[in-house]
Image (cartoon, rainbow, N blue to C red):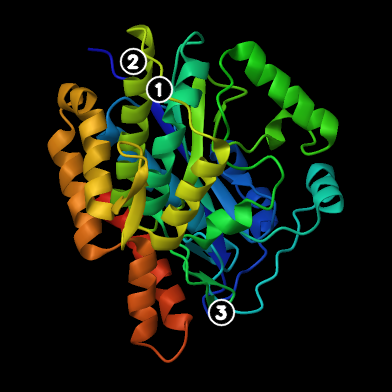
Amino acid sequence: MNLRHVGVEEEMFLVDPETRRLRPVSDRMIHASRAAADGLDQELFLQQIETKTRPHTALGALRRDLAAQRRLAARSAESAGAALAAVATPVMPDDDGITTPSVRYRTMMETFGHRGLVCATHVHVEVAEHEAIGVVDDIQPWLPMLVALSANSPFDRGIDTGFASWREQVWDGWPSAGPVEPFVDSAGYADAVRALIASGAALDEAMIYFDVRLARNFPTVEIRVADVCTDLDDTILVAELARGLVETAARSRAAGETARPWRVELLRAARWRASHDGVGRLLVSPATRSLTPADEALGHLVDHLRPVLDQHGATESVEAAIKRVLTGGTGADRQRTVAAGSADLTAVVDDVVRRTKDSWMTVAQS
């Protein structure tokens, strides 16, 4: 059995170790080292850095690659006087973004206004050209489950937002962002992309921010709904589920089965619920199209993927990982627990920075 390749991009913040506020030093990281050549990229704001893995079929290898990329980013950050923080929104007050000095990013700010700082996990899953649109269309209703499991942004600039993933709310400020209704075929996808660009809602194809989109430079679909996770266990769970969703959809299409479409308003509602509750209360289950206790809804997800997970030998590990999140909480739950026992939010930043470092040091030592 051939496993689909999976690759992951992670966006992370750069933090001043003393003030715990964001530090705009990505330009120093890139220009003062081999970071760019080694795979680090700048993002929209100077307080961010992006890592990219190679494509892998074995998720153990993917995990080691993720750790290696985090190690590279952390050491480059240290050389610029910053610490690496895998968290999806700024925790401390008064953290305003400084735009990375490029023509493209300046044009984005001038055209669309200032957008909040957020960091995500993007999962690329290999697809054949004839599979791609069917996969994009059919996995949409299940993506809020990944939002819930990866939720890691309860705070934004010193405020508890009430959400598990506030990043999702901030990200929706981009006019091309979010879930979509079925494209049906590649012509429908291309027409939608052209229309969005022509309307001015996107500068170009790189600014098509659908929850899942066709990658421009790789034979993959890119699933873009997850917060960046502090713990690599959560990142690997999201990657395994993303691959399972893609494989399940492709097999169903090959068998002549097409998923029943959802109205985009209902997809947005399901995504809002997942970003608000995380795994703590209710999720919209695609199996029932209704609000369902989170543990039951995630059980429906596993059932949906079970034939593929069984063949991949991943069912037991996925079920254990979901149980771990349900029992121990998401990254958002961890942040709130730390905050509740501290006088201010500096303890949350310290905890995130420490666990980010642990995530790559533990793998490096194993």
- Per the image, the residue denoted by label 1 is 259
Mark 2: amino acid: Ser
Q: Is residue 209 above or below residue 232?
A: above
Q: Earlier in the sequence, mark 2 or mark 1?
A: 2
Q: Are marks 3 and 2 in contact (CB under 8 Å)?
A: no
Q: Secondary structure at mark 3?
A: loop
Front-lying residue, 282 or 41: 282
- Per the image, the residue denoted by label 3 is 158
Q: Earlier in the sequence, mark 3 or mark 2?
A: 3
Q: Nearer the viewer, mark 1 or mark 3?
A: 1
Q: Secondary structure at mark 1?
A: loop
Front-lying residue, 201 or 286: 286
Q: Is residue 223 above or below residue 258?
A: below
Front-lying residue, 3 or 359: 3
Question: What residue is shown at x 71% (from left), y 58% (from top)?
Answer: 115
Q: Nearer the viewer, mark 3 or mark 2?
A: 2
Residue 6 seen: yes
Query: In terms of image quadrants, where is residue 66?
Result: top left
- Image position of 320 (left or right of 72): left
Question: What residue is shown at x 34% (from left), y 68% (from top)?
Answer: 333
Q: Is residue 205 above or below residue 17?
A: above
Question: What is the tally of numbered marks visible in this picture?
Answer: 3
Q: Are marks 1 and 3 in contact (CB under 8 Å)?
A: no
Mark 1: amino acid: Ala
x, y percent for residue 159: 55, 78
Q: Which mark is residue 252?
A: 2
Q: Is residue 153 above or below residue 262?
A: below
Q: Nearer the viewer, mark 2 or mark 1?
A: 1
Q: Are marks 2 and 1 in contact (CB under 8 Å)?
A: yes
